Amino acid sequence: MVYFAKWKIILVFAVCALGIIFVAPNFLATKTAEGLPDWLPHKQISLGLDLQGGSHLLLEVEVDAVIKEYLEGLVDSMRVELRKARIRYGGLGVEGFGATATIRKPEQLATAQKLIEQLDPNTTLEVQNGNKIVLTLTEQGIQDQRRSAIEQSIEIVRRRVDETGVREPTIQRQGEDRILVQLPGVDDPERIKRLLGKTAKLTFQMVDEQNSVEAAKAGRIPPGSVLLPEADEPGPDGKPNLLLVKKRVMVSGNTLVDAKPSVSQRTNMPVVTFRFDTIGARKFGAVTSKNVGKRFAAVLDGKVVTAPEIREPILGGSGEISGRFTTQEAQDLALLLRAGALPAPLTIMEERTVGPGLGADSIAAGKIASVIGMVAVIAFMMAAYGRFGAMADVALIFNIILIGAALSVLQATLTLPGIAGVVLTIGMAVDANVLIFERIREETRLGRTPISAVDAGYSRAIKTIIDANVTTLIAAVLLYMFGSGPVRGFAVTLSIGIVTSMFTAIMVTRLMVVTWLRRKRPRTLAI
């Protein structure tokens, strides 16, 4: 007997009704959909870069800069240890993938070796020319630094892009040291490029007021200090003003927990206010307490943004960065500081901009292809299976509705290959019904009654349907896992289409067939 449980009937009506409700916002204007109450579905299908238009960037991480910075840190550590032990040295610096130091007294060489070889487990120590110590990064250490730089850069790029409010960006690693960034709907790609191009490394260092800037310009830079350009307006000669700053970082921007654009109450100019975490606040308070009356420089990406005099200890863990900022520049700087500093500079290797007009043409072409495919399938099913084909066509319409609803709810990005996946699903969606109807035909030819033939058709074809769809679903999942960009867009719509087509073919069509059988009780089946 053909039997359809009440809970299944309720499930079919509930799923189809929810599909209609959740797909409905896509037929409204974007502003109208966003203005709907929160308790109503208002999410629309998120369009990808190729449909909505936007910016495509391929960034290269300058990982060598990370390794150099790491080695410079080793050099500083070597300087501290050698000075503590009162060992005379010279030639302290970075050479290739190693940090070097020349020990002036031979009797101090063994002591220096013991101190230096304990600084980093990912290094090997070698003595050259009898008194030159070379601390070289191991191959594993170099690979660890490269991998860490790439992973951290991807995370920082993602934070910065998310802060701008871009919906459904694609940010992923490509190759060994490159990052692919796709930003659908971006109307100001130049701003995004500026945000991603800045390292945003903020440090607080003391100004060297004991030595002359003019002497440093002449080449007599004292050890432990460095000449840095000021981010202010250039001098009379058109070159940036230089300031002598001590190399030692007193407080790092890594301890910042918040940064916001604001307006200075003293100058009425845009500034950026910041706040440290507990550790940063303690360090900042200690430095400002010990150096009242001295100048304290805020250095951003190697440029002195501001260098005010410390008038009193700053113990609250907060402060402000002032400069000749515009309102937009203050907002962008605050965004960069909140997102964190990049471990290495990024270079734009490739840039493409997709106009919304091309995306609109793609959507129109996709609609035409979908409509043509759907009309052809509907006509074929009605011609081949009559009334049963019409029922399969109704289920096909609900299948398309459920795909749109699922894309809206999941906020999965619809790409041009994704549209191809939808068109393919339209053709595949009736496969299950074809298998069932052909089985019903065979059972009818064998002399079974209509009810018995329908029951046998569904029960015997169900295993084949599940096997065929599950294998296709596995392939789609693998495409999503190992594919990228367009391939993943195709895999998303194909996966959703497989699930919805199984539901509509097995549940929706069967409900219509069972209802017709119970009401009409035909003696023969015209199929």
Image (cartoon, grey):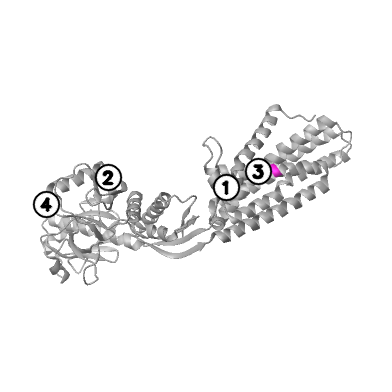
Marks 1 and 2: which is nearer the front?
1
Instruction: Work out whether 445 lies above or below 267.
Output: above
**Are discs 1 and 2 less than 8 Å apart at CB?**
no
Marks 1 and 4: which is nearer the front?
1
In three-dimensional space, the C-alpha distance between marks 1 and 3, rounded to whole angstroms, equals 18 Å
Give the amino acid at mark 2: Arg
Quadrant holding the N terminus: top right
Which of the two labelled residues, at mark 1 and mark 3, occupies the earlier sequence position? 1
Which of the two labelled residues, at mark 3 and mark 2, occupies the earlier sequence position? 2
Which of the two labelled residues, at mark 1 and mark 4, occupies the earlier sequence position? 1
For the point 17% across and 69% down, the residue is: 217
Is any part of residue 176 visible from this angle?
no
Residue 150: give x, y in percent of width and height. Answer: 39, 56
Q: To which residue does mark 3 refer? A: 401
Residue 166: give x, y in percent of width and height. Answer: 46, 51
Q: Residues within 10 Å of mark 4 (few under 14, many from 20)?
A: some
Residue 94: give x, y in percent of width and height. Answer: 25, 64
For the point 27% across and 43% down, the residue is: 277
On the rendered structure, is 35 left or right of 140? Answer: right
Q: Nearer the viewer, residue 130 or 231?
A: 231
Marks 1 and 3: which is nearer the front?
1
Q: To which residue does mark 1 refer? A: 29
